[in-house]
Every structure is written in structure tokens, then in C-alpha cells.
Amino acid sequence: MKVTIIGGAGGMGKWFAWFFKENGVEVRIVDKSDGTETVAKELDVQFLNTDVLTLAEGARRDEVVDTDVLLVSVPIDITGRVIERVGPEMRKGSLLMDITSVKKMPVETMEKCTNESVEILGTHPLFGPSAKSMRGQTIIFVPLMKGSLYERIYKMFESNGARIELLTAEEHDEIMPVIQGLVHFILLSFGVTLKNLDFDVERSRKFMNPMFEIIMDFVGRLLHQDPHLYALIQSNFEMGKIHESFLSVANRLHELISAGKVEEFMDEMRVAKKHFGDTERAMVDSDRVIEEKINRSLEKKKK
């Protein structure tokens, strides 16, 4: 099986190039980056240094689609245009897939731009390029046209320990704005607030208990990553209503405390707890994470 990755010199493209190579697959990366050749040599894979969006019809584009699996790993804002370029040229029996954070747009575009003999698989890996492996990682599959290549990809991911969850594109784009978009929005807002308060994060760490330190680490984790990606996630999901709901709740809680309405504030917590469900399990699981954090800190001090 041969896999070609458009955007293969980027973070996730490079990760999947490494993953497929480790699983005995012939890999080629396609990218316009100055570092494309360097990445290809580092991974020992084939490469094509070109901008897919500028390719006219002909031999060069045929070279890109001369593959069994074509994986699109480019920013959300150009994913549709890339698919429109390569989709019509996909050969019979090949598979076109993407790893974009949104699913309805790319899956619909892949269906529109390919013939019925091409397999179509939308995916969303819920991990970043810092992941050491697929073991224990969740990846969403949105299959539209399944065949033998889809089965091989599924089994490969599964055998490497991935947690594969099947959704429709519509289901995915209803769930992810909350479990991904809202969480990112809250943590990034936290980070910007620390900046606006001119709060000394490093000095404050020695006063934090392990739970607060873990939360602060997650804020730093997001701030450490590509701001363009996170801006695209916020602007490409239908986040407007979610942002408004969050801001409305934050303002209400602020108003309750400002007015000294402590009992009403407590009522909001009680109702939210009932809706949340198994908060006891959440306590047990988070206690385990906190204990691991404590143990690692103690081990560092011993060294």
C-alpha cells in the first residue's frame, strides 16, 4: 500500500508519515514548505515539493494522485480547495481521506469531487503531533465509501491501540464544538486573562496544589501550540451560540456573587452537578491523575 500525504511536512502530516512508515507502508509527502526535503530525509520517505493549489491539470497533478491512499493534512481554510484539486483525479479503487478538525465540509467536498469508485474516509485524530503513538488515543472515523483500503486503515489504526469511534459528519460537528471548541475557548480565555492581570505564573506555581497545577499546565499546553489552528477551530465550528451561552453563564455567576446571592450561586452548582451525571467517578478519576502528578513531583525532588 502506498500513502501520499498532502501537507506532509506539517506537524500532523509528519506524524502520520512517521506512523505509516513504522507500519511498513510506502510513504510520500507532498508540501510546498522549504523544509519538505529535510522532513523526507529525516523520515526516509519520498517527497514532492510543490503547492497542490497551483497545480494545473496534467502530469504533475497525476503524480500527486498516483497512490493508493491520499491523505489531506492541510489547514482547515484550504482543505476544501485542495480536495477540489485532487478529488476528480483520484484513480479507481483508491482512498481519499482527511484529518481535519471539522467533518461536514471536507466529507461533502470529497463526495462531490470524486467518482463512485473512490473510497472516502473523513477522520479526526483527537491528539496532536506530540503524541508518542496511537495507543489509547481517540480518533473519529466518518466513512462514506468503504472498501478494502478502508478496512486496512481501520485494522492498522486499531492494531496500534487507537480508540476508533464512528460518527456521521453531522454528529461529529455537533459534538466537537463543545468537547473541543468550548474547552479550548475556556482555557485560552484563562491564558489571556493571566496576561491581562499581569499574573506571575511561574512564581505562583509553588503555591498551587497539584490540581491547580494540572489545570495551569493545560492552559500552557494550548498556548504553546499553533495559534492559527486554534483560531480556525473557533471560526469553522458553529461556535457562536456556544460562546454566547458560556459568556451568559459567566456573567450570571458574576452578577450573583456581586449581589451577594450566595444561595442562588450554590443552586446553579447543584443543578449543573445533577445534569453532569457521575461526578463521583469524575472525582475518583481526577484523584488518580492528581496522585500521579504528586508522585512525579516527589521523584523529581529525589533526583
Image: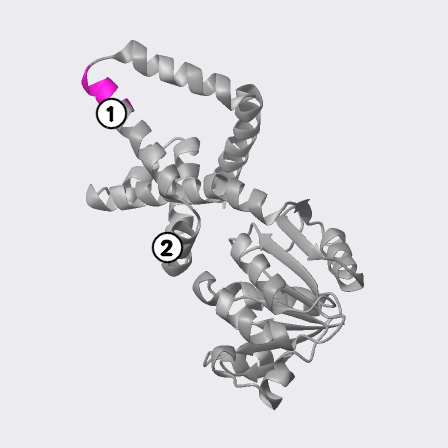
**SS type, badge 2:** helix
Residue nearest the observer in this picture, 216 or 261: 261
Amino acid type, callout 1: His
Residue nearest the observer in this picture, 279 or 58: 58
Q: Which residue is mark 1?
A: 254
Indicate the position of residue 192 as horizontal and vertical percent values: 27, 46
Q: How far apart are the two marked residues, 1 and 2, measured between alpha carbons?
A: 27 Å
How many numbered marks does the figure carry? 2
Crowding near pointer 2: few (<14 within 10 Å), some, many (20+)?
few
> What secondary structure characterizes most of the magenta part?
helix
Question: Which stretch is magenta?
Answer: 253-259
**SS type, badge 1:** helix
Residue located at (52% from left, 86% from top): 56
Indicate the position of residue 99 as horizontal and vertical percent values: 57, 59
Amino acid type, callout 2: Ala
Q: Quadrant of the N terminus?
A: bottom right
Q: Which residue is mark 2?
A: 231
Indicate the position of residue 71 as horizontal and vertical percent values: 62, 67
Residue located at (39% from left, 50% from top): 234
Q: Is residue 266 visible?
A: yes
Crowding near pointer 1: few (<14 within 10 Å), some, many (20+)?
few
Examine the rendered structure and indicate whether residue 156 appears above or below residue 69: above
Examine the rendered structure and indicate whether residue 249 appears above or below residue 135: above
In screen coordinates, is 262 left or right of 92?
A: left
Residue located at (40% from left, 56% from top): 232
